[in-house]
Image: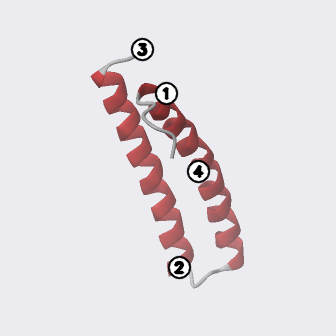
Amino acid sequence: MTGPNHVREMVHDLRNRLTAIASAAIAIRKSNFDPELSEEMVEIIRNTIDRATETLNGLSQEYPGEER
C-alpha cells in the first residue's frame, strides 16, 4: 500500500509512538525515578523505539531521498 493516505497513517503512527515514549519518560521523572516503575517504563520505551524505528524505515522506503 502506497500513496498519501499510507504515508499519513505512517506519520500518525510515528507521532503516537513518540508520544508514548515521551509519556513513559515523564512517568519516570514524576515517580522520582522509582526503580520498579522506571524499569517498567524503560521496557516500554525500548519496545516503542523499536516500533518507531520500523515506522521510520517504512517512511524511508516511501521517500528514499539522499543518504545522510
Question: Mark 2 highlights which residue?
Answer: 29
Q: Amino acid at mark 2?
A: Arg
Residue shown at 53%/64% (left/top)? Answer: 24
Total number of numbered discs in the rendering: 4
Pick whichever of labels 2 and 3 is earlier in the sequence: 3
Q: Residue furthest left?
A: 4
C-alpha gap between disc 2 and disc 3: 39 Å
Label 1 – label 3 distance at C-alpha = 12 Å
Q: Amino acid at mark 3?
A: Met
Label 1 or label 3, whichever comes before in sequence order: 3
**Labels 1 and 2: the sequence-earlier one:** 2
Nearest to N terminus: mark 4 or mark 3? 3
Using the image as rendered, state which of residue 67 and residue 40 is in the foreground: 67
Q: Which of pointers 4 and 1 lies earlier in the amino acid sequence? A: 4
Q: Which residue corresponds to the image point at 48% horizontal and 72% vertical from the top-left?
A: 26
Above or below for 39 versus 61? below
